[in-house]
Amino acid sequence: MSGLRGELRRDEPMSKHVTWRAGGTAARAYLPADCEDLAEFMRRLPEHEPMCFVGLGSNLLVRDGGFRGTVILMHKTRAAIRLESSPTGLLPCVYAEAGAASPKLARFAAEHAMEGAEFLAGVPGTVGGALAMNAGCYGSETWEFVERVRTIARPGELRERARADFDIGYRHVGLKGARLGGDEWFAGAWFRFRAGDAPRAKKRIRELLSQRVATQPLNHPNAGSVFRNPPNDHAARLIEACGLKGFAIGGARISEKHANFIVNPDGRASAADIEALIDHARRTVRERFGIALVPEVRIVGLETPA
């Protein structure tokens, strides 16, 4: 750790860092001070050390056996959001680092009289997570507004990449000719939003947040939408049609408020309970409708302690 400015923890309980408030421990967790500090830390890691980047933990389940590698806790960084001049001389871009919360980016854009970012107020994660899965809601998706990105490669090398370097789809982003997330991760991005009206953008954010409170079980630990919506349908409709609202395994339950949410209402669900409930919902929907639901949630780690 000599010369590093971040914090290294051992046997870190990941239930503290995922929004389900369940799961095992990470053998090591590093809280970088900033991107440059993270780059230096990565240069010192053994070549084959397993790594997992975590933002606000809203789309992640760490199995009860834990993660036998190093977790990078990006939400603890001093993540910058700032205006930067555009090379074309048009409206300035907004640069946001991966550890910044998506709702903070939405508010920043609104404060600077930009529109288009309001939907990000309803994305319960960081900019890095939104980039990695092309997060979206209320009719908009993250990569609609991305001009270029900054990534960090496994050797600790910071790179700048164009939007054209990526294959972009519904809840999917892949680096052409490589495997993003295996050797390279998002460190930040430049966003181009529309010139607009600050009061109108702020009003829209308030409306979307009110809609979110009214339709989602935010009073219980959850990880947001569990499944992608299949073409021309909604995962919540299919799960509800199977009579699964309120169905529980152990301490995990399918929300009565929104069927595409699994909640941990009493804080006693294990990661195994949640994963079993995910599998049960997928199996039930497939048996009844012949549709294979695809999880949005990333599941990592060992089922039982090593």
Image: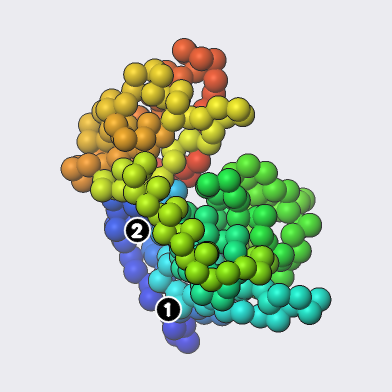
What residue appears at the point 39 percent right and 65 percent down from the top-left corner? Answer: 29
Q: Nearer the viewer, residue 145 or 133?
A: 145
What residue appears at the point 73 percent right and 53 percent down from the top-left corner? Answer: 166
What residue appears at the point 70 percent right and 81 percent down from the top-left corner? Answer: 85
Q: Compared to 232, does 54 lie above or below?
A: below
Gap in Å between the C-alphas at discs 2 and 1?
17 Å
Q: Is residue 66 visible?
A: no
The mark lying in front, picked from 2 and 1, is: 2
**Pointer 2 residue:** 17
Name the element at disc 1: loop
The outermost residue toward the top is 288
Q: Compared to 90, does 179 lie above or below?
A: above
What residue appears at the point 76 percent right and 75 percent down from the top-left corner? Answer: 90
Q: Amino acid at mark 1?
A: Gly
Q: Amino acid at mark 2?
A: His
Residue 43 place in picture, x, y as percent = 58, 73
Write down the quadrant of residue 229 in the picture: top right
